[in-house]
Image (cartoon, rainbow, N blue to C red):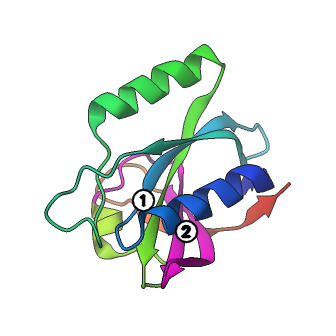
Amino acid sequence: MLRITSRDYDSIRRHGEQTYPHECCGVLLGRFQDDGPRLVTSTARCGNTRIDSPQNRYNIDPRELVRIQREGRGRGEDIVGFYHSHPDHPAHWSTTDLAEAHWIGCSYVITSVEKQKATVTNSFELAGNDENDKHFVDEKIEIN
């Protein structure tokens, strides 16, 4: 389960609307709770560095990711997941999303943005033991 404030949830959805027709992307920061859920305490917007097809792919610059991770650790936060948008596509992971996901145990949030309006937002946990058996599992979003 992913626990997130309505403020952060709305911010993710607005980010997708603002970058339409390109994909937005960002990082979910917070804590892994002992009872299993991931608790989001802040989000960090990232620039989509994909220049070949930003309307249906995204990439986060590794230097930006390291900076966000360091700043989060300074506040006592870990990276608990990532988010991106699917312009004019369903809020479901693609084979490319799975191939490019590497943070096992983290949440991957996808928002469908249709004609510049965020519609559906879903979350998926990247499960498995390693790259060979990783897979996405549907995950409930609890908005506080």
Horizontal side of residue 46 vs 49, given as left or right: right
x then y, percent, for residue 20: 42, 70
Determine the secondary structure under disc 1.
loop
Horizontal side of residue 112 vs 50, given as left or right: right
Q: Which residue is mark 2?
A: 137
Camera-nearest residue between 30 and 13: 13
Residue segment shown in magenta: 100-126
- Could you tell me which quadrant the C terminus lies in? bottom right
Residue 24 is labelled as 1
Q: Amino acid at mark 2?
A: Val
Label 1 vs label 2: CA separation?
A: 22 Å
From this viewpoint, which residue is outermost toward the top?
74
Q: Amino acid at mark 1?
A: Cys
Determine the secondary structure under disc 2.
strand
Q: Are marks 1 and 2 in contact (CB under 8 Å)?
A: no
- Number of marks: 2
Residue drawn 46% across the image and 67% down it: 85
